[in-house]
């Protein structure tokens, strides 16, 4: 189905795209009588930026929720790193190395930026209740180690100045950035971004696109994102899946997708004669 | 001016992560500890200990406990009175069943037993939230009080149905029983309070505390980030109940000496501790102390003013006291919903710049 050869290759700008990391096989997801996703298959390859696009209500967010285990599809299989995924809870999937951001910001509003980002390191922290109660010793050492990791992400996202600020009071664009940081600090293998640029102005979108590309470039993180801004999607993604009414109507490089008649019909409408 | 943090730079993450990052705060904390340990024991009398200091210290422990559950982990509980009763009755059974057991171990073991009971009653929190969970914990409250009334084994089949703390000593000083001295019981409670408060602070600043707060602020996002909700909620219930159990044991053994469960550990106790936490400030250890001080001191103060200074009859003063406390709580919640701790934060923020606000 995919036009791209299964072996690893190097993109024009010199990034290495590896084998398949995640594969969705014939996923069908129903809510009662509503079929949100109809028999969709696609894969995500190591190191690529994979976009999922489609009109409102196409089932894109549901797809992400299937990937990180929040929804369990009625039919189909999810394969991650060559293994078929059994029934797992979302927190177990997070521990496997899948992180995500949300369409509507889902930060922990009562906590500071630093604490939000440190929460992203939770899966890496191991000290037990007793050693945390004593604090001096292993717990403090671990906290400082993790703090260094968190600070690296804070530097990377250029949010040093709001480190101690409660996130509830930050402007929208910065909150989105903190949320990206929280997902990123977990050093995920696969990063899911649900409309990372929704509601942003052009400048903020440019910043965010730069961060996404930098993440992909510097950390080699595989990224799957949902986005509505076609310009952005076509610019930053390696391959695009197009969904409409829960079904897949296109899959390929941005150029292939752009010239796909079904995609054009879904986006621009089709004349009924 | 008064409140200097200029030049107080941090060069390590360790110094940045300490409890009182500002030197001024740190010194004030040491001075408070010094006064509490070295000055207060020599100047207190029985009235001060029994009316103010002991209840303040004991309720501070209970408030820290409830604050861990409600303020940090966002799980509302109305079962505090019942859990305090578990602590008190565990302590009684341990004291009478093992007369040689050190009183300190009795108190801490009572906390552990309460922690187990708390985790058991915390299980519904995995399915239900908010008001529904509050109702479930309310059931725990009534069930536990009923249990301690109904099953005579818990009060050693005494005719009155009361439990009485036998005399126990620690390092040769009487801690419980009839003839205890004010400084000794005060210091015993103070040591426990300081110890438990430091532990609470350590737990809430580490990754366990962050997983609690993540569950509180947005449980779905927390789970997707990798927080195990079962573990986070049950540890919160367990640790919270440990504190509440210790407070219940101290209230019974050290402060009251004799307890009838319905009278002392009824639903009003649950509300009292909940008010302390709300007025003091949810999600703040300092707030737990402030709330406990407020709720303990206010009635004493009102009584002294109304009966002592104005010479009103005691019964009118008592009723007026209820009205005033209730009114103050309402006014307080409207004006400063985040409690005394937030008020304190605002004052500190203002003091940073005072008297030159630019």
Image (tube, coloured by chain):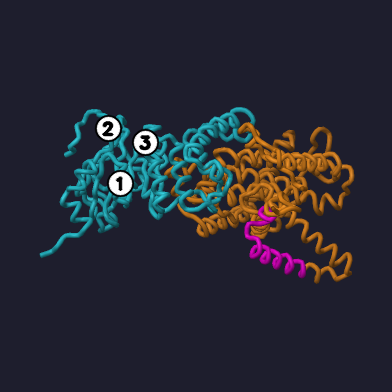
Chain colours: A cyan, B orange
Q: How many marks?
A: 3
Q: Where is mark 1, residue-wise?
A: A233
State the separation of the CA atoms marked 1 and 2. 17 Å
Q: Chain of mark 3?
A: A
State the separation of the CA atoms marked 1 and 3. 14 Å
Q: Residues within 10 Å of mark 1 (few under 14, many from 20)?
A: many
Q: Chain of mark 2?
A: A
Where are the magenta residues, as a range?
B319-343
Q: Where is mark 3, residue-wise?
A: A216
Query: Which label is found at residue A72?
Result: none
Q: Residue at x 82, y 63 (%)?
A: B303
Q: Would you say residue A104 sits in the magenta stretch?
A: no
Q: Chain of mark 1?
A: A
State the separation of the CA atoms marked 3 and 2. 13 Å
Q: Residue at x 39, y 49 (%)?
A: A205
Which residue is more in the foreground, B276 or B169?
Answer: B276
Q: Where is mark 2, residue-wise?
A: A11
Q: Residue at x 71, y 65 (%)?
A: B328
- Left or right: A188, with A135 as reference point: left
Q: Residues within 10 Å of mark 3 (few under 14, many from 20)?
A: some
Secondary structure that dominates the magenta span? helix
Of labels 3 and 2, earlier in sequence is 2
């Amino acid at each position: 189905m995919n036009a791209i050869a299964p072996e690893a290759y190097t993109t024009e700008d010199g990034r290495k795209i590896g084998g398949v990391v995640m594969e969705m096989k014939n996923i069908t997801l129903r809510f009662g009588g509503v079929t949100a996703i109809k028999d969709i298959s696609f894969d995500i390859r190591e190191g690529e930026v994979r976009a999922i696009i489609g009109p409102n209500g196409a089932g894109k967010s549901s797809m992400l929720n299937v990937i990180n285990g929040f929804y369990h599809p009625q039919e189909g299989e999810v394969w991650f790193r060559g293994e078929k995924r059994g029934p797992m809870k979302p927190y177990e999937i997070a521990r496997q190395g899948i992180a995500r951001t949300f369409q509507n910001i889902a930060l922990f509003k009562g906590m500071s930026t630093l604490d939000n980002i440190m929460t992203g390191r939770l899966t890496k922290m191991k000290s037990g209740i007793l050693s945390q109660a004593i604090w001096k010793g292993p717990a403090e050492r671990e906290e400082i180690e993790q703090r260094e990791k968190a600070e690296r992400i804070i530097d990377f996202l250029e949010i040093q100045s709001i480190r101690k600020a409660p996130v509830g009071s930050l402007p929208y664009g910065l909150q989105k950035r903190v949320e990206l940081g929280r997902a990123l600090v977990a050093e995920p293998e696969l990063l899911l971004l649900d409309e990372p640029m929704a509601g942003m102005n052009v400048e903020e979108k440019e910043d965010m696109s730069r961060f996404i590309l930098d993440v992909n470039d510097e950390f080699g993180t595989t990224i799957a994102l949902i986005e509505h801004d076609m310009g952005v999607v076509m610019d930053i993604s390696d391959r695009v899946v197009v969904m409409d009414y829960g079904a897949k109507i296109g899959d390929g490089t941005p150029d292939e997708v752009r010239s796909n008649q079904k995609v054009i019909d879904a986006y621009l409408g089709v004349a009924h004669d | 001016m008064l409140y200097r943090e200029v030049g107080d730079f941090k060069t390590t993450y360790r110094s940045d992560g300490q409890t009182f990052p500002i030197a001024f705060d740190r010194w004030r904390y040491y001075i408070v500890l010094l006064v509490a340990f070295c000055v207060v024991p020599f100047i207190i009398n029985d009235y001060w200990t029994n009316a103010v200091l002991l209840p303040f210290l004991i309720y501070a422990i209970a408030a820290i406990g409830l604050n861990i559950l409600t303020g940090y982990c966002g799980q509302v509980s109305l079962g505090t009175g019942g859990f305090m009763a578990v602590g008190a009755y565990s302590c009684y059974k341990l004291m009478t069943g093992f007369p040689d057991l050190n009183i300190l171990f009795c108190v801490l073991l009572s906390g552990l037993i309460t922690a187990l009971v708390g985790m058991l009653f915390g299980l519904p929190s995995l399915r239900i939230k908010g008001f529904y969970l509050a109702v479930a914990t309310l059931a725990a409250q009534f069930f536990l009080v009923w249990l301690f009334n109904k099953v005579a084994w818990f009060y050693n089949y005494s005719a009155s149905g009361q439990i009485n703390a036998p005399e126990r000593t620690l390092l040769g000083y009487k801690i419980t029983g009839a003839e205890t001295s004010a400084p000794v019981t005060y210091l015993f409670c103070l040591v426990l309070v300081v110890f438990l408060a430091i532990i609470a602070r350590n737990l809430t600043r580490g990754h366990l505390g962050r997983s609690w707060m993540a569950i509180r602020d947005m449980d779905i996002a927390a789970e997707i980030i990798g927080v195990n909700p079962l573990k986070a909620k049950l540890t919160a219930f367990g640790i919270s109940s440990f504190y509440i159990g210790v407070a219940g044991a101290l209230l019974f053994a050290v402060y009251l000496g004799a307890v009838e469960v319905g009278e002392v550990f009824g639903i009003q106790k649950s509300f009292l501790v909940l008010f302390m936490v709300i007025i003091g400030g949810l999600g703040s250890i300092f707030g737990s102390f402030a709330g406990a001080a407020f709720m303990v001191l206010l009635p004493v103060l009102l009584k002294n003013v109304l009966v002592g200074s104005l010479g009103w009859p005691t019964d009118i003063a008592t009723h007026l006291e209820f009205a005033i406390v209730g009114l103050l709580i309402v006014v307080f919640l409207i004006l400063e919903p985040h409690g005394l701790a937030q008020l304190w934060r605002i004052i500190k923020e203002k003091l940073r710049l005072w008297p030159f606000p630019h």
